Amino acid sequence: MCLSTFPSSNLLLFLRAPAAWRPPDGTAAGNRYDWFLASPDLASEEAETCRIITFAGDDLAIAKKVSDHMPVMATFKTDAKFRDRKPN
Amino acid sequence: MVSTIVWRRTLKIVGVELPEAGSRTHLIPLAWASFLAKAHLITRFVRPHILYGVWRRPPEAESPSYLVGVEVPDSTDVPAGLVAYKVPEGRFAVLKSEDDPAGSVTAYELVMSHSPRTGDTSREALAFEIYDTSREIADEYDVPVYIPVQ
């Protein structure tokens, strides 16, 4: 998986499934990649990782009953004090 | 862990079901993500800021299933792609988990470990967790778990 930012755009986080992995379904758009809409500072400062969650075996069969999309998980540094943080 | 006994009216919960969730708790976040993506299909709510995690053991199933959803009026049709559980009215033991707001301490685990120290015994009904999204997620956030008793 990869995490990329595009500072000139509001579409800042881009992730792609690994080439060796052949998903049975797809992301929400049915593709091997997906987008996150995030503010520039969120992507450049707080964002840590994002990845597409994949399943295998019995888990895959159950997961497909729950959703026809693969979930994307992003992690952010929520407890850090960044320059855009406003005091309460 | 706090325990009280309350009476709850019948609830109709509509949402996304995870089969065999009791043996696949690691897939519960997928059910939450799927529900949030489909929540717009629900147009009638009782309390839209309250999310429910409901545990049900179908007669033929070895492991209980889990439904992530919201309460809707009883007359509401179930949108395509979603599932409805009806939680019968009755008495519930309310346990509050103050240790894990993310929900890894599940109702199912609590049901399995609950001892009848109050003198109440379990009854055949659905157990559920309540997530109040109007509250700030802070250290003191707790998740009440309702376990059916008689």
Image (cartoon, rainbow, N blue to C red):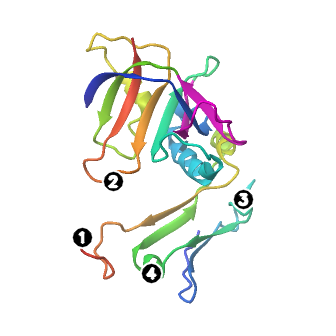
Cα separation between marks 1 and 3: 41 Å
Cα separation between marks 1 and 2: 16 Å
Looking at the rendered structure, the secondary structure element under dot 1 is loop
Looking at the rendered structure, the secondary structure element under dot 2 is loop
Viewer-side residue, A62 vs B16: B16
Asked if disc 1 and disc 3 are in contact, CB closer than 8 Å, the reply is: no
Looking at the rendered structure, the secondary structure element under dot 4 is helix
Question: Chain letter of disc 3?
Answer: A
Q: Choose top left, top right, bottom left or bottom right for residue A12.
A: bottom right
- Which residue corresponds to the image point at 65% horizontal and 68% vertical from the top-left? A34
Between disc 1 and disc 4, whose residue precedes? 4
Question: Chain letter of disc 2?
Answer: B
Asked if disc 1 and disc 2 are in contact, CB closer than 8 Å, the reply is: no
Query: Magenta stretch: residue B72 in it?
Result: yes
Residue identified by numbered label 3 = A26
Point out the image quarter for the C terminus of chain A: bottom left
Cα separation between marks 2 and 3: 32 Å
Residue B103 visible in this rendered orientation of the protein: no
Find the magenta span and give its range: B63-87
Tag 1: residue type?
Answer: Asn
Q: Which mark is residue A44?
A: 4
Asked if disc 1 and disc 4 are in contact, CB closer than 8 Å, the reply is: no
Residue identified by numbered label 2 = B137
Tag 2: residue type?
Answer: Ile
Question: Where is residue B42 shown, x and y percent of the image?
Answer: 62, 46
Both marks 1 and 2 on one chain: no
Q: Which mark is residue B27?
A: none
Question: Chain letter of disc 1?
Answer: A
Between disc 4 and disc 3, whose residue precedes? 3
